[in-house]
Image (cartoon, grey):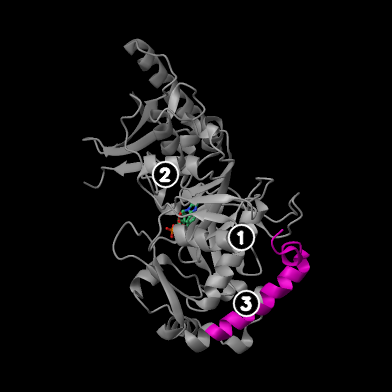
Amino acid sequence: MWNPSIERLPQRDLEEIQNRKLKALIFYAYEYSPFYRRKFKEIGLNPWDFDGLRDLDRLPFTTKQDLRENYPFGMFSTPLSHIVRFHASSGTTGKPTVVGYTKNDIEVWVECLCRGLVSCGVNSQDIVQISYGYGLFTGGLGFHYAVERIGATVIPTSVGNTRRQIELMRDLHATVICCTPSYMLYMSEVAREMRMEIRETKLRMGIFGAEPWSEETRRRIEDKTGIKAYDVYGTSELGGPLFTECVERNGIHIWSDHYLIEVVDPETGERLNEGERGELVVTTLSKEAFPLIRYRTGDVTFMETDRCACGRTHPRIMRILGRTDDMIIVRGVNVFPSQIEHVIMQVPELGEHYVIILDRKPDGLDEMTVQVELSEKAKIERTTDILELERRVEGLLKEYLNVRAKVEVVNPGTLQRFEGKAKRVIDRRKI
Ligand code: DLL
């Protein structure tokens, strides 16, 4: 373990730390954040009366909208002179959200990711290729600092120039790769075009995240490349890539001495029980520049707190299904793209690349079309066989998810590839 005394700390002691830090955070936010002071005043919350974890429900939520409205510096709690770095989220609509870090914030970020990397088996002997984007996106630099801290070697390739990435992976003997799962799939295709197989390189594991992916995709990546695939989660508002699975691969450990998590009903905001699926809400317990109180991540998951077989006591969140705002509602059925992915990837004749297109028909009804590539290996040429395959996949989607979707199987290599976060849904209903 990277920090065994903390990673194995009994849950009661962790709660005590959380309680103490939460009380301190409320004073800190009241004193230094004009935004939170205003919010607390609005609801009549006096830091002196705040009783830590027991009073958690009294605290207001913070939303992405709050961050946008307070762009660029309205959420900061330290003078700009204390900020050592900015990052910005990729924000699909409107203004980006800008986040800042003090020296200590970067330290906490590095500490969290080091714990995660070591928990899934990265060590100082590893050569780690970082194929997350460097720059305003937190992926590249986030991993960079943590990998160096562990004492492993970094190959800072960032995204793009895929052929060169693969040559470097081979020539510099990379043992670990960090990138989005969709980029890993693309890399394995490009490697084949180069008459190379990833499994012939020294690569042994990959740490994939920044976008939703399914268990089936994990299996596909592992089958195609011969490496072990681990999940990593984080958001720029909370820090960047922060939390990973451990070798047990039974959820992502959230380092609860620095982050307090809850799962709430996205509609009512009510706290849900362990094991119940809802929106992940996070309170930062150590951040200085940009503390967040009950931040609604928009990510849908559920939580487990029982002790993990790895010996770590910190709670785990299970694979993120998607974002509340990415949830597709077609004819009254709610479905996440990752659930569609899970179903189509169980069909051996299909490849890994897919896109979901939403249309509104003239009669006002919504229609969902799933375009998915045929697998390179599938030996189907007859149109009737393709049609039969399409009907079969439509049947599976109906059976597992209760969604009615039109399935169109297209030739391998025809759908768009992604180097960073994949865009899986094209919503033409609003056009
Ligand atoms: O994506 C930070 C990151 C970098 C995480 C590298 C992992 C690896 P943002 O650009 O702010 O930050 O996007 C955060 O991406 O709210 C989720 O919706 C999604 N996301 C991140 N990791 C996962 C994951 C980075 N493992 C948003 N599974 C989050 C599913 C993920 N979704």
Neighbourhood count class around disc 1 (C-alpha, 10 Å): few under 14, some 14–19, many 20 upward? few
- Give how far across and how far down residue 67 sits, in percent: 39, 71
Residue interval drawn in magenta: 1-28
User: Circle 2 — which element?
Assistant: helix
Query: Label 3 belongs to which residue?
Result: 22
Query: Label 2 belongs to which residue?
Result: 165
Decide which of 317, 262 is in the foreground and name it. 317
Discs 1, 3 touching: Cβ within 8 Å:
no
Q: Say if 364 sits above or below 52 in the image.
A: above
- Mark 1 or mark 2: whose residue is earlier in sequence: 1
Image side of residue 383 versus residue 236, left or right: left
User: Circle 3 — which element?
Assistant: helix
Q: Say if 394 sits above or below 284 in the image.
A: above
- Mark 2 or mark 3: whose residue is earlier in sequence: 3
Quarter holding residue 196:
top left
Q: Say if 60 sits above or below 422 in the image.
A: below
- Give how far across and how far down residue 246 sits, in percent: 66, 50
Quarter holding residue 55:
bottom right
Q: How far is disc 1 from disc 3 in space, using C-alphas?
A: 33 Å
Query: Label 1 belongs to which residue?
Result: 151
Label 3 CB sits under 8 Å from any ligand 1 atom: no
Residue 45 in sight from this viewpoint? no
Majority secondary structure of magenta residues:
helix
Q: How far is disc 1 from disc 2 in space, using C-alphas?
A: 22 Å
Q: Say if 376 sits above or below 306 in the image.
A: above
Q: Is residue 369 magenta?
A: no
Neighbourhood count class around disc 2 (C-alpha, 10 Å): few under 14, some 14–19, many 20 upward? many
- Give how far across and how far down residue 396 sits, in percent: 48, 26
Say which of marks 1 and 3 sits in front: 1
Decide which of 159, 223 is in the foreground and name it. 159
Neighbourhood count class around disc 3 (C-alpha, 10 Å): few under 14, some 14–19, many 20 upward? many
